[in-house]
Image: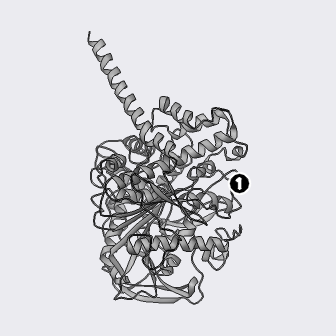
Amino acid sequence: MRFRALLGHSPVFRFLVYLVLSSFELGQAKVDGEQPSPIVQTEFGEIVGKTVSLPFSKLVYEYLGIPYAQPPLGELRFSAPKPAKPWSGTKDASKFGAMCPQPPFPSAVESNETESAEMSEDCLFVNVYVPSTIKSNDLAAVMVWIHGGAFTWGTGAYYPGGILATFNDVIVVTFNYRLGILGFFNVPGTDVAGNYGLLDQVLVLKWVQANIASFGGDPNRVTIFGESAGAMSVSLHLLSPMSKGLFKRAIMQSGASSTPFCCGKATSTMQSELFANAVNCSMGPHLMKCVKGVALEKILTIQKKIAHSIFSETYHIAVPSVDGEFLQDLPKNMYKAGKFHKDIDVIAGFNSNEGSIFTLLTPLFGLLKDGMDRKMFESSVKGLFYAHEKIGLIGDLIMFQYTNHADPNDKIALRQAWMEICGHVLFDAPAVLEAKSLAKGGRPPYVYLFDHRALYTVLPDWITGVMHAMEIPFVFGAPFKKSMAEFEDLIADLAPQFSESEKGLSLMVMKLWTNFAKYGSPNSPESNPIALTWPKFTEEEQAYLVLDLKPRVEHKYKPNKMAFWNELLPKVKEFTRIRKEDADEEKVSRDEL
């Protein structure tokens, strides 16, 4: 079934919210009289794409909308994906396939404008970007991008990989995977196992292993990289036995699966019960049959209600879960125990103000320009940890740690503290925890902090540093678009301009990323894009590269704040758990007397 979904977003909203959190739609180059690409023989049949002209006087062959799985419809809904069926003839691969079903993004900005986007459950497609200079006898490194969007929004089509691919002769792959309820609905203790979106990702990696050589790619040099939920996915693939041997390197941009909001049983149970109750399906043995018969429109309506309650106590999105197959245990436990693939090279990092994105999602955004009062601060902290923590002592500790006790009611300081809390708990601290675990396990990663605030004047001055996802344009070469009109109305009316120095930053980031994909190190044996060596993150030094117009190496990122989240709070949680068990046992003993 296909239909046109209406996503109503103003240009400002689309730039600041939807495309910041879920993806950054770079747009396709506009080419008059497109020429077909060379025909490629895949395991399922022949395909022909299109040839596109890009900056640097390069050509890229784009193969779009290639089916990698059977449509997950009917009995295949809420099931592991099955490989695509063969086709006869030569399939047209010059256009993107439909995006996977997803609700409109929750907005703090009201708008009457709408944008049509084709969505369908028949959405499991892969896109391949091949530089015309790739030679069949010299297989190229491959970079497989996993898009972000809180496992609820996004599509691979938002990230055209042509500039990144042609800049340093790598092959870039993007794709769709099932999202939201359709991708992650699970009920612990039943055959509704969840993680279908992650199983889609595994099938893509298997597709790459089987087919990428036909495009000129090297299946032995596959790098998976992603941002936000995409980076969390990468982090999970480093743990999963199902992903072992399917990739060689990994880049995690602003995401780690050790975040407290990933994979917990409480999260899975709550979102499952919310959905099942909403569609009138009982949590019993016939649950799977019942939910497979629910109309897609109804599923999206329910997801919209859940998504738009993002700052209410009922907020829950579908997330990965511990299913015993793809994921054996909570990620933080597995990383701490060293249960990750130790033959993978890793880059991991985050931006300097990740948490500022959450100021855009609150319906109180308009009030934040004057700061955040104490009442709003405390309620926001409690809302963030609802259903994930017994807020009590934990909440008190968090608010104590982030309060300026010289002036505990300083509204500007409290607003900044709220952004820091969101960024530290969701992105920074989990990334540091995983980096330390990798280093301890004998595979020290390369760690970065992206700290260049691009010239996007639509951001208010009080949002300092670099917001979540704002490194993505530099990774995909957005500064080298010939004109902002090529962004297909996305931000053309805002007309932000990249400076020459920002073009240099994009060149540097693309070189570092592609060097890593090629050689396992961003420090190229041929040409280093920075005037220093990017050191690995060891247990002792904990070095990280600050990516800015003038890159530099620093050590031990915010050690006190990271120790608070990664060392103190876990001990407090364990202490309170033991105290509660002791109290319960004491109560039972008294009752028995």
Compared to residue 306, the image places residue 512 above or below, namely below
Instruction: From the viewer's side, name the closer residue of 557 and 115.
Output: 557
> Which residue is denoted by mark 1 in the rendering?
460
Kind of element beneath mark 1: loop
Q: Is residue 330 left or right of residue 480?
A: left
Q: Which image quarter is the N terminus in?
A: bottom left
Q: Is residue 61 left or right of residue 200?
A: right
- Residue 197 image-quadrant placement: bottom left
- Residue extending farthest right: 370
Point out residue 225 in the picture as x, y percentages from the top left corner: 43, 65
Residue 84 visible? The answer is no
Q: Which image quarter is the C terminus in?
A: top left
What residue is shown at x 41% (from left), y 56% (from top)?
182
Point out residue 409 in the picture as x, y percentages from the top left corner: 68, 33
Compared to residue 160, the image places residue 59 above or below, namely below
Q: Amino acid at mark 1?
A: Pro
What residue is shown at x 33% (from left), y 25% (from top)?
581
Point out residue 545 in the picture as x, y percentages from the top left corner: 51, 61
Instruction: From the viewer's side, name the closer residue of 527 and 368.
Output: 527
Compared to residue 346, the image places residue 47 above or below, namely below
Instruction: From the viewer's side, name the closer residue of 254 and 96.
Output: 254
Q: Is residue 256 left or right of residue 471?
A: left
Residue 454 visible? The answer is yes
Instruction: Assess disc 1: are there few (<14), some (14-19) or many (≥20) residues with their C-alpha within 10 Å of its C-alpha.
Output: few
What residue is shown at x 64% (from left), y 45% (from top)?
363
Point out residue 587 in the picture as x, y percentages from the top left corner: 33, 16
Instruction: From the viewer's side, name the closer residue of 424 and 559.
Output: 559
